[in-house]
Image (tube, grey):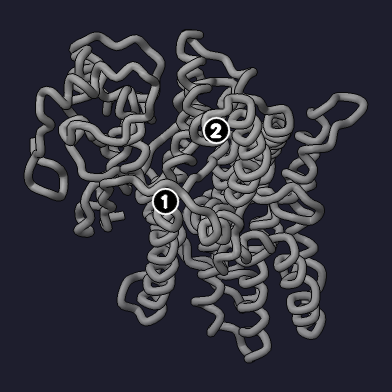
């Protein structure tokens, strides 16, 4: 097979290959037969809800077919480090978030543009108004078709981006997963692949940890992290920690918000059946229609509690971490791993190497996790703003409809009021919902434990809506402007300050990459097709 992106295969002389395979001194192999460097497409990892991550015992035929589905590559986009004990559906959700989030962000922009464009087409009579209703005062009009189109396109991109990226002229994204990228049938090639772990790590642009509670208890997981840290090239290779409980909160929030906003799209359909005049829809009817989504917030609170428990476990594991306490399937591997870590972190001194690596996990790794999921400090979001923004697509689409139809308002003040109300919902009000849930999820009641907070979730859901979204406290124009510029925006800037810092490139990993010196691999090529 040709090397992806190069058109040819280089082969290692038989004597060199034999020497590599028989390496038994525990050294991290930095060179390998190029035919062993194989990558699985991101689509293969996501396919059938990440079935490939199932711990089921596969037959030799299945393993051979999976290995043949990979391609010989000159570099890897991602090296995924994970524990096989973790449920594959959690990994599937995490992979959708990690691999497709940029496409989902682009889809969100396209979704916004498409929603506005469709609304304008309806306004100018180019296409018929299919799902339109008017509020009772006739000052506000809503059209549902752009909302449904937007949600459908967002879901399509989120789940299927790795399959459809070829239509945009993009090649496949190649990832390393030991189960398929290392030959599991041919014992000689399997031994050579395992011995060349350093070459796999050094060829990866991103080291992605699918973090589960038992990750730091597994010796080989920690070994992969240590090896990548040792080989990391400043400014070119990045470590990303993605707690598996993190995406569950976002998906639960997305479902609750979408269902809560669904009445804005389907009122023209169900309204006549319920005896509602679609030319005079009341606010009370819409509020009642939002109740199913409001009650779904109880699931969001449940997932937020699981996420908080996972964060507590992360903190506890990092505080008490020591590689000497990790578990290993075969204890014969422990001396080799500790010898390598002693060499990388302690110049051969076992005690010093273990101490420095333990300290690295407790400090640098903690900062890497905080870069991804936020810092645990007062009045700070536990989830980055961009991810919440994407998970709040339902409410965002409703507000964009307000932007596109604000010209129907009778005065400039009414138009500005509609724009500010929508902006307050998009930028701060809706993103604050899962943040407040995470804050509340850490609370335990003396009676009932976690259950009372789950039952209170529909009420908690209303708090950021009432305080931060313009129009819920007062319809007065002056009050609305003061509320937006003097309360809503400052609250958002404080709570999402870490997201703003990351957007400006002020995150810890970006700064430290400028200062630290890393080991440069002797031969390495990076691709540009991200």
Residue at image location 43% in from the left, 39% down from the top = 95
- The residue mark sitting in front, 1 or 2, is 1
Give residue 111's quadrant in the image.
bottom left
Q: Quadrant of the C terminus?
A: bottom left
Q: Where is residue 371 drawn, in percent x and y? A: 60, 51
Q: Quick check: 171 left or right of 243? A: left
Give residue 362's quadrant in the image.
top right
Q: Quick check: 33 left or right of 296? A: left
Residue under label 2, please give it: 211
Between residues 316 and 197, which one lies in front from this camera angle? 197
Q: Where is residue 20 drawn, in percent x and y? A: 24, 24
Query: Label 1: how many residues lie within 10 Å, few (<14), some (14-19) or many (20+)?
Result: some
Q: Secondary structure at mark 1?
A: loop
Position above or below: 511 against 400: above
Q: Where is residue 353 drawn, in percent x and y? A: 59, 31
Residue at image location 74% in from the left, 55% down from the top = 380
Residue under label 1, please give it: 233
Residue lying at the far front in this picture: please name it: 348
The reply to whether residue 434 is visible in this rendering is no
């Amino acid at each position: 097979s040709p090397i992806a992106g190069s058109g040819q295969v280089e082969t290692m002389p038989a004597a060199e290959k034999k020497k590599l395979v028989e390496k038994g001194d525990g050294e991290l192999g930095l060179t390998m037969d190029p035919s062993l460097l194989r990558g699985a497409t991101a689509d293969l990892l996501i396919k059938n809800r990440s079935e490939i991550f199932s711990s089921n015992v596969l037959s030799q035929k299945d393993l051979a077919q999976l290995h043949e589905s990979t391609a010989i590559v000159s570099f890897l986009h991602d090296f995924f480090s994970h524990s096989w004990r973790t449920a594959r559906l959690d990994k599937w959700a995490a992979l959708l978030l990690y691999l497709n989030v940029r496409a989902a962000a682009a889809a969100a922009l396209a979704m916004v543009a498409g929603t506005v464009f469709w609304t304008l087409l309806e306004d100018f009579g180019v296409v018929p108004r299919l799902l339109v209703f008017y509020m009772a005062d006739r000052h506000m009009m809503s059209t549902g078709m752009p909302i449904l189109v937007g949600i459908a396109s967002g879901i399509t991109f989120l789940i299927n981006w790795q399959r459809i990226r070829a239509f945009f002229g993009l090649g496949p994204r190649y990832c390393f997963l030991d189960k398929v990228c290392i030959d599991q049938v041919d014992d000689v090639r399997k031994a050579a692949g395992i011995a060349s772990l350093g070459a796999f790590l050094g060829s990866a642009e991103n080291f992605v940890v699918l973090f589960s509670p038992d990750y730091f208890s597994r010796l080989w997981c920690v070994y992969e992290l240590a090896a990548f840290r040792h080989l990391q090239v400043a400014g070119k290779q990045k470590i990303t920690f993605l707690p598996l409980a993190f995406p569950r909160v976002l998906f639960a929030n997305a479902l609750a918000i979408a269902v809560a906003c669904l009445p804005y799209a389907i009122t023209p359909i169900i309204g006549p059946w319920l005896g509602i005049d679609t030319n005079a829809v009341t606010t009370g009817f819409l509020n009642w229609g939002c109740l199913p989504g409001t009650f779904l917030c109880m699931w969001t609170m449940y997932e937020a509690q699981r996420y908080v428990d996972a964060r507590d476990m992360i903190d506890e594991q990092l505080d008490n971490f020591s590689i000497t306490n990790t578990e290993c399937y075969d204890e014969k591997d422990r001396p080799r791993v500790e010898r390598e870590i002693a060499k990388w972190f302690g110049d051969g001194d076992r005690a010093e190497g273990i101490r420095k690596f333990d300290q690295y996990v407790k400090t640098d790794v903690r900062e890497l996790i905080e870069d991804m999921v936020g810092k645990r400090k007062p009045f700070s979001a536990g989830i980055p703003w961009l991810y919440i923004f994407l998970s709040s697509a339902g409410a965002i689409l409703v507000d964009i409809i307000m932007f596109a139809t604000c010209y129907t308002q009778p005065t400039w003040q009414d138009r500005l009021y509609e724009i500010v109300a929508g902006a307050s919902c998009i930028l701060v009000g809706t993103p604050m919902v899962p943040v407040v849930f995470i804050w509340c999820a850490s609370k335990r009641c003396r009676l009932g434990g976690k259950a009372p907070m789950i039952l209170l979730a529909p009420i908690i859901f209303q708090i950021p809506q009432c305080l931060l979204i313009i129009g819920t406290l007062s319809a007065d124009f002056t009050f609305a402007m003061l509320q937006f510029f003097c309360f809503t925006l400052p609250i958002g800037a404080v709570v999402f300050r870490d997201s703003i810092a990351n957007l400006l490139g002020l995150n810890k990993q970006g700064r430290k990459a400028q200062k630290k010196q890393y080991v440069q691999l002797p031969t390495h090529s990076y691709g540009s097709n991200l």
